Amino acid sequence: MKTALLITRSATGAAHYAQVRAALAELGTTEVLHGAEGAGLLHGQRWAQETGNAETGFAPDWQQHGRAAGPIRGRELVRAADNVLALWDGKSRGTANELREARRQGKQVKLLMI
């Protein structure tokens, strides 16, 4: 099961990782997909190293897409996933956009508010 990590930038602490790890186990995740930067990268790589499972980063192409690169990357990330795990502070517009995209695509979403 491929799980997209949509994690607000401020969720970098050990307690946040513990939430991610527990939720990924609950979802039956075998591969994490992340945005190739920030908290998603941090927690995704750590989880993959600890569990021996795969992780894949989706880097935004700022040069080709300019300011649209983040939303384009978010759509591609969600599209490639079977389900979504989000840690959201209720403020981050990027995470909010990715959550809307996941729901639009009909993905199962596990949302943890931080």
Image (spheres, helix red, strand yellow):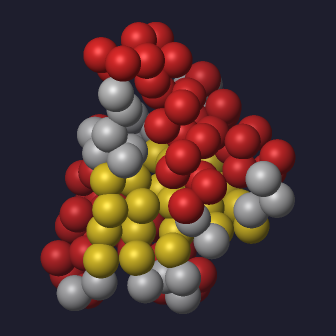
Q: Where 90 falls versus 66 (above or below)?
A: below
* Image location of residue 8, percent across then percent down: 47, 38
- Residue at (37, 47) in percent of width and height: 58
| Quadrant including the C terminus | top right
Q: Nearer the viewer, residue 58 or 3?
A: 58
Residue 88 in sight from this viewpoint:
no
* Image location of residue 70, percent across then percent down: 47, 27
Q: Where 72 falls versus 83 (above or below)?
A: above
- Residue at (51, 74) in percent of width and height: 2
Q: Where 7 falls versus 14 (above or below)?
A: above
Q: Is residue 65 left or right of residue 99?
A: left
Task: Examine the image and state in which quarter residue 32 appears.
Answer: bottom left
Q: Residue furthest front?
A: 64
Q: Nearer the viewer, residue 88 or 55?
A: 55
Q: Nearer the viewer, residue 20 or 29?
A: 29
Task: Examine the image and state in which quarter residue 10 appears.
Answer: top left
Q: Residue furthest top?
A: 67
Count of numbered marks: 0
| Quadrant including the N terminus | bottom right
Q: Where 66 falls versus 109 (above or below)?
A: above
Q: Is residue 59 left or right of residue 27?
A: left
- Residue at (37, 32) in percent of width and height: 60
* Image location of residue 30, percent across then percent down: 43, 84
Residue 49 in sight from this viewpoint:
yes
Q: Is residue 56 left or right of residue 111?
A: left
* Image location of residue 63, percent across then percent down: 30, 16
